[in-house]
Amino acid sequence: MADPENNPFYITTAISYPNGRPHIGHAYEAIAADVIARFQRLQGRKVRFQTGTDEHGLKMARKAEEQGRTPSDLADEMSGYFRDMCDALDVSYDRFIRTSDADHHVASQAIWEAMEASGDLYLDRYEGWYSVRDEAYYDASELIEGEGGDKLSPQGTPVEWTVEESWFFRLSKYQDRLLDLLKQPGFLEPASRRNEMIAFVEGGLRDLSVSRTSFDWGVKVPGSDGHVMYVWVDALTNYLTGLGYPGDMGDLWPASLHLIGKDIVRFHTIYWPAFLMSANLPLPQKVFGHGFLLNRGQKESKSLGNVTDPLSLAETFGVDALRYFLMREVAFGQDGSYSPEAIVLRANAELANSFGNLAQRTLSMIVKNMDGRLEPFEIAQADAELQATVAHACRTELPREFNDLNFSAGIEAWMRAVYACNQYVDEQAPWGLKKTDPERMKSVLQTLFMVLRDLAIAIQPVVPAKAAALLDQLGIPAEERTYAALADSQWFARLVTTDFGVAAPIPLFPRLELPASEAAT
């Protein structure tokens, strides 16, 4: 395996379109990306994590017009809600980018000029179907018929016939290279998305309209008065802007992972690679199109009145409990469902009753029966077996699954280790050993102390605040909380020689209750 310190990791989310406030889907993607970023940092890699908002395009311009305000004013307000969401959910981004940022306009114009220098841009007339909501062009063969006979996009959104002068990008030129790229193992996952895109490219690519003249809220096309860039040219370029393009991007490009929703895979695995090929820039290493998060099995929509504010969920159930539920409940890449009842059930069973209670009981017994002091002890076979079980889950199983973006499987392995710890407590019964064999009681309690440290270090990407709180209670220094530290066999001996003492523990995960409004429904 490559040296982590010389193997930087650049991860991006899709930048959110801020024509409305954030919903649970935005939170899901931001949290998943944060888990990946934190996981890679704990492996010792230099990580760059970028998220932000995609503020240009006809949809924003019309929304602002409806409200009697400027697009810039609307973007300033709405972008703030997305940044607030990331901050509230403990999302550790390095840059929150806005496509209205001055350096982003410079970068977008630079990639345009690079594509033009390759002979891949030409001026012509566009006539065709356009979905304002998707900011996407569709061929007539892709359209579906709505209930009233209206034409709709494949996503079910309204389309309108558009006629205007436009710059075109020679997408068709890159058909064979794109097909080769899509067939490379690992470039696009899951496999179902890859198969869809291969079929799309094999169906033939037409040149892409990449400028508009019917509105002016966007990045100006260099040397072409009245034209602004098609919003996706501008939006995708944000991944370069954040690294300093067109200047030196250091060792962070190409991106290690673009994490996106499955509905925008075409833009990221066909249009974006083609733009980069044209500009003679390296291609991203991986694109992962995750599934949708459904509200009790239904897609959220304003018309159904089931749109969920993620900050409300976090305030009700706790940030880390929400993060844990979203990563644990859904097989990443597939659609998944959530409900307040499901969050409460999962958090109480696993975080409160199993992990939180394990920490609470262990530390409380060390305070009560050992005055909070640690000491050298003899490790029995049962102790060694438990340590080996936990070590395998924390050092091998969870990291392996997280590397493959199988978060639910990684957390499942971690939970099996938690259950093994609780079974060990029941079997060893330290409360009884206090009278019959106090030295053995100390060994049992300190074995639990040691495995708690491993469990807390391993789960940090998912529940960063609660894991940090437990590691603080265990006296583990900040520099000893990496995955490499899990293999340090001397940490406990060093801790024993310090003046550290276990204090009365603070409960990590109090049991959750359904809000009265939910319980009554």
Image (spheres, grey):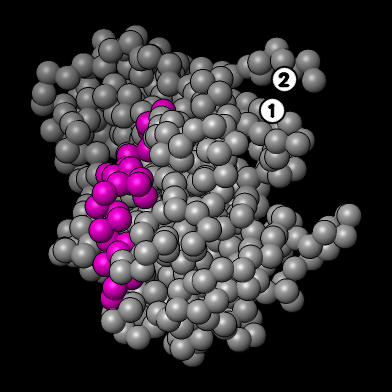
As drawn, the residue found furthest toward the right would be 148
Residue 452 locus on image (x, y percent): 36, 32
Mark 1 or 2, nearer chain start = 1
Left or right of residue 361: residue 203: right
Who is closer to the viewer here, 351 or 305?
Answer: 305
Is 99 included in the stretch rendered in magenta?
Answer: yes
Who is closer to the viewer here, 461 or 360?
Answer: 461
Count of numbered labels shown in the rendering: 2
Residue 355 visible within the image: no
Q: Residue at x 33, y 24 (%)?
A: 469
Q: Which residue is drawn at 52% across and 71% down?
A: 165
Magenta residues (range): 87-114
Q: Mark 2 points at which residue?
A: 518
Q: Residues within 10 Å of mark 1 (few under 14, many from 20)?
A: some
Does dot 2 land on a helix, a strand or a loop?
helix
Does dot 1 land on a helix, a strand or a loop?
helix
Is 316 included in the stretch rendered in magenta?
Answer: no
Disc 1 residue type (three-letter): Glu
Mark whose residue sits in front, 1 or 2: 2
Q: Give how far apart the Cα atoms at labels 1 and 2 are.
A: 8 Å
Q: Which label number is shown at residue 189?
A: none
As drawn, the residue found furthest toward the front would be 225
Q: Which residue is drawn at 57% across and 44% down?
A: 62
Residue 301 visible within the image: yes
Q: Height in image: 394 above or below 465?
A: below
Q: Mark 1 points at which residue?
A: 341
Who is closer to the viewer here, 309 or 347?
Answer: 309
- The quadrant in which the N terminus is found is bottom left
